[in-house]
């Protein structure tokens, strides 16, 4: 069985006002969470932590921030298949509380090693909102509305890490770095309770099983509930299959593999910026810690511009391309936004790197980050929606594979930042990254052109 057989990709058959299960439902509380914010909020206060723990290694203090993203890489491989087998809400609620508990551990950490462990475990729990969110979008929204829905969903995972350092800088400077984690505990615990009370199940197969059980007891189970899809999974076999499915889908398809590689590289660049921007502005521009977080606003402005443009144009562009293609929809049409967004990544690194290297006024490096934020939204929203469209009911698994790989880049690429900048400087160091990004810009263009042929030759396997 492959993903193309598991989903109906007929664009013209989609009712744009409602999905097959009735009016489009808002994904209550699924996008409102502090977990992505938790990944970067400690960044401005990391030097205050260094003093308490007597840490002198820049690699270690960068790792204390990026280790959270490594937890994001592991969690989806387990949580996504569980959500497909047993329901979105039970997995999401359990992971939310698991995430909140480890903020307490981080706040009370006696040394750097324990802080790193607690940050990692918190990342595992926090990953649920990212991976299950893609599955919820597939559950709730028809093809004609997924572009806008996914663009709005992308706000949290990308804008959260930008807002985090702004908040974290003021908290760390005024109350101490440990209070960053106390604030996270309060925020994550509160929202975990809210989601527990208000969240609703969206997994169609799970809901069918729920309706099937009382009918069986009354001896009136309808044939529709006896379908293979609605049968309860074999616990062991289902879990083993589910755990291997995300990486099988990503690594077994050339299209998904190269898009994952490209998106992961860009994501790694984002976290490299998160771990180095504070150092740049506190050392080179002599900003206090509480103000250094404001330097991330360049990224945030770019994200806001990007999300506005993508939300307004994504679905309309796909609709227009579908009509031009004799009303035949192809998932590759989702990548049209990516083609426009990709060049902004290298532009941003050349601009940001050389203005910082030459000690030009601080506003210019910040403005130089705006194109990166804009380009990243276009890349993330279009590629993630593409994954959802081609994966059908297994969207959570394909998104899990995508998140796992990109978070590995997010965890380890920043570790190269201090050494690279020390050897090459801000100018040539960022130019090197810009040239690498420039070299990868043809990836979405080639898949946009030849993706349909490759999907037919290499179907996306889900079993």
Image (tube, helix red, strand yellow):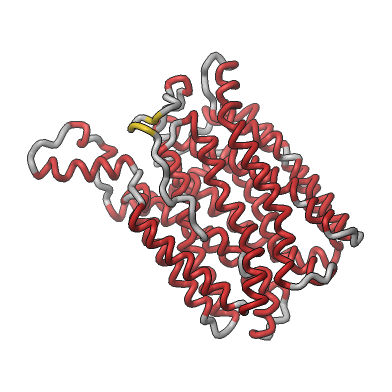
115 and 32: which is toward the camera: 32
Classify 44 as above or below 159.
below
Counting every numbered tag in the picture gives 0
Instruction: Give the quarter of the figure containing the N terminus.
Output: top left
Depth order, front residue of 280/22: 22
Residue 220 occupies quadrant: top left
The residue at 73%/74% (across/down) is 58
Q: Quadrant of the C terminus?
A: top left
Res 238 visible: yes
Q: As drawn, is 430 to the left or to the right of 216?
A: right
User: Measuring 43% from the left and 24% from the top, which residue is drawn there?
Assistant: 14
Given the current orientation, which residue lies at the most extreme top position? 326
Q: Where is residue 171 in the image (x, y as percent from the top left)?
A: 62, 72
| Residue 324 place in picture, x, y as percent | 60, 16
Q: Report whether 160 appears left or right of 352.
A: left
Q: In which quarter of the image is residue 353?
A: bottom right
Q: Where is residue 270 in the image (x, y as percent from the top left)?
A: 68, 55
Task: Tell me what residue is drawn at x 40 percent, y 38 percent.
Answer: 140
Q: Which residue is drawn at 83% across and 50% down?
A: 350
Q: Inspect this view and state whether residue 62 appears.
A: no
Q: Does residue 298 lie above or below 178 as drawn?
A: above
User: Is residue 188 placed above or below 335 in the rendered structure?
Assistant: below
Q: Where is residue 79 in the image (x, y as percent from the top left)?
A: 41, 55
């Amino acid at each position: 069985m492959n993903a193309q057989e598991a989903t109906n990709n007929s664009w013209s058959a989609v009712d744009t006002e409602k999905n097959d299960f009735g009016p489009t439902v808002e994904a209550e509380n699924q996008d409102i969470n502090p977990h992505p914010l938790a990944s970067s909020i400690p960044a401005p206060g990391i030097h205050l932590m260094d003093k308490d723990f007597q840490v002198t290694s820049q690699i270690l203090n960068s790792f204390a921030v990026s280790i959270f993203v490594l937890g994001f890489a592991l969690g989806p491989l387990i949580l996504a298949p569980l959500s497909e087998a047993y329901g979105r809400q039970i997995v999401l609620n359990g992971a939310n509380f698991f995430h909140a508990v480890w903020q307490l551990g981080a706040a009370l950490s006696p040394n750097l090693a324990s802080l790193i462990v607690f940050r990692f475990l918190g990342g595992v729990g926090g990953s649920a909102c990212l991976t299950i969110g893609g599955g919820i979008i597939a559950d709730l929204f028809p093809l004609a509305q997924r572009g806008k829905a996914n663009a709005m969903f992308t706000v949290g995972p990308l804008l959260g890490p930008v807002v985090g350092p702004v908040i974290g800088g003021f908290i760390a400077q005024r109350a101490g770095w440990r209070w960053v984690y106390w604030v996270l505990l309060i925020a994550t615990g509160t929202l975990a309770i809210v989601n527990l009370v208000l969240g609703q199940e969206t997994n169609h197969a799970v809901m069918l099983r729920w309706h099937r059980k009382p009918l069986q007891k009354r001896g009136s189970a309808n044939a529709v509930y006896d379908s293979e899809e609605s049968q309860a999974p074999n616990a062991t076999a289902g879990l083993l299959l589910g755990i291997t499915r995300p990486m099988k889908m990503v690594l077994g398809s050339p299209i998904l593999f190269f898009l994952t590689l490209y998106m992961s590289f860009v994501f790694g660049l984002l976290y490299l910026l998160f771990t180095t921007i504070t150092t740049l502005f506190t050392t080179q521009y002599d900003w206090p810690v509480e103000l250094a977080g404001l330097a991330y606003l360049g990224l945030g402005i770019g994200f806001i511009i990007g999300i506005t443009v993508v939300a307004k144009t994504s679905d309309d562009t796909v609709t227009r391309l579908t009509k031009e293609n004799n009303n035949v929809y192809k998932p590759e049409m989702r990548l049209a936004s990516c083609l426009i967004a990709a060049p902004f990544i290298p532009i941003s690194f050349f601009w940001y790197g050389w203005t910082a290297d030459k000690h030009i006024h601080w506003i210019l490096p910040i403005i130089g980050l705006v194109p990166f934020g804009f380009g990243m939204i276009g890349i993330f929203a279009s590629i993630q929606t593409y994954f959802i469209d081609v994966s059908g009911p297994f969207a959570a698994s394909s998104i899990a594979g995508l998140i796992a790989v990109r978070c590995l880049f997010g965890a380890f690429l920043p570790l190269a930042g201090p050494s690279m900048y020390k050897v090459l400087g801000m100018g040539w160091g960022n130019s090197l990254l810009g040239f690498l990004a420039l070299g990868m810009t043809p990836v979405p263009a080639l898949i946009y052109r030849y993706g349909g042929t490759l999907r037919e030759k290499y179907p996306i396997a889900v079993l």
